[in-house]
Amino acid sequence: MPIIKVDKLTRRFGNITAVDNVSFDVEEGTIFGFLGPNGAGKTTTINILCTLISPTSGRASISGYDCSSQPSEVRKSIGIVFQDTTLDKDLTAYENLMFHAYLYKVKSADMKDRVRDALHFVDLFERRNDLVKKFSGGMKRRLEVARGLLHRPGVLFLDEPTLGLDPQTRASLWEYIADLPRKHKVTIFMTTHYMEEAEICDRIAIIDNGKMITIGTPDELKKTIGGDVIYIRTSDNKKAKLEIERLFSLEAVEKDDELYFTSSKGDACIPEIIKTMGETVLSVRLQRPTLNDVFLKMTGKGIREDEVSSNDTVKEAVRAYRRRRDRG
Ligand SMILES: Nc1ncnc2c1ncn2[C@@H]1O[C@H](COP(=O)(O)OP(=O)(O)OP(=O)(O)O)[C@@H](O)[C@H]1O
Ligand SMILES: [Mg+2]
């Protein structure tokens, strides 16, 4: 069942079309990601969904409530972690959460338990009486995630939740976020421009210049690249090229001292190559397509050239999460 429905959504600011005829659905209990560069229209879309601004045209609904005509119902169904921090720095972590619980009319008998549970969930219970201004960036983000969940929303929006955090903190924040759908029965709508973080999503929409370019699971998107690229170096590349063409009916390209070719079943090709070419093989490597390859193919440019370079700590955390998820 889709919990978020977006239909031909458009938002203009003067002559800028920040969101341009965007349509998609988000299934309940999943992590959905908007991946796109600066100014792509990610925050503007979130702002419409969160009822903070209205669309120029098109419709959006959350839990069946229309974002333009039923804003109060929508607001009760959502939690939000804004791109820029909105905690009160002169209050303690505990006070920030109690204040939010009060604003959202959490029953007073439940308030203390809810706040305590939320603080435990993000491992900040021991620091509950510290002023937020003494918190690190990662602790503030975790506290904001806890706050966003306090009133038990059906959908939690996370706008660039890890922006500006160091790699270790980003990795540990993902540990919390990845567990949310299972532990809190909440649907996540997140934005990011970090490729490796987008891998955590069940589905991703790539957005650029207000337009949605493509949508799918990370694996589906990567498959559009046409498969894995296999690089092979042999003692006789001319002969190996003919052999690859004979074995797989695929054309191999010679580049520098290597041959490469693209295959949808890269894993299966490698043993076949070793078996047939034996000792003439000096090296074989397989490169899986990345979301950056997808973005490059679709837009002709990288997301943010300076930040695209992969980060091993975050990548490893995301891989560990996917392994856990796939094991069930
Ligand atoms: N209130 C506004 N008034 C005028 N233009 C706006 C306003 N809000 C956003 N825009 C413009 O709309 C476009 C999309 O902005 P938006 O903040 O949605 O991008 P974003 O994808 O969230 O980018 P970032 O990754 O930098 O957060 C930009 O060109 C921006 O300048
Ligand atoms: Mg933004």
Image (cartoon, rainbow, N blue to C red):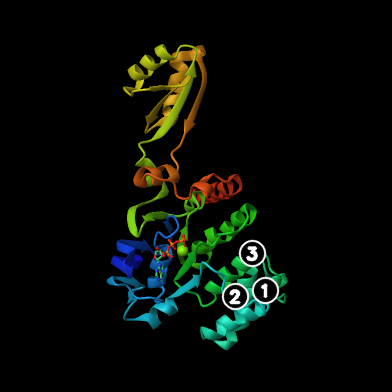
Q: Name the residue under label 1.
A: 132
Name the outermost residue toward the bottom.
Answer: 108
Q: What residue type is labelled 3?
A: Gly
Q: Which of marks 3 and 2 is nearer the N terminus?
A: 2
- Report, in whole angstroms, how far the alpha carbon at label 1 lies from the one at label 2: 8 Å
**Which secondary structure, mark 2?**
loop
Q: Residues within 10 Å of mark 1 (few under 14, many from 20)?
A: many
Front in this rendered view, residue 133 or 300: 300
- Residue shown at the point (44%, 79%) measured from the top left: 76
Mark seen at residue 87: 2
- Residue shown at the point (56%, 57%) measured from the top left: 174
Q: Which amino acid does label 1 sit on?
A: Val
Quadrant of ligand 1: it is bottom left
Q: Name the residue under label 3.
A: 137
Q: Do the residues labelled 1 and 2 touch (CB within 8 Å)?
A: yes
Q: What residue type is labelled 2?
A: Leu
- Please state the horizontal and vertical placement of residue 209, each as a whole percent of the image: 36, 57
Quarter occupied by the N terminus: bottom left
- Please state the horizontal and vertical placement of residue 149, each as a whole percent of the image: 53, 72
Whether residue 113 is visible to the viewer of this picture, yes or no, is no
Name the outermost residue toward the front.
Answer: 15
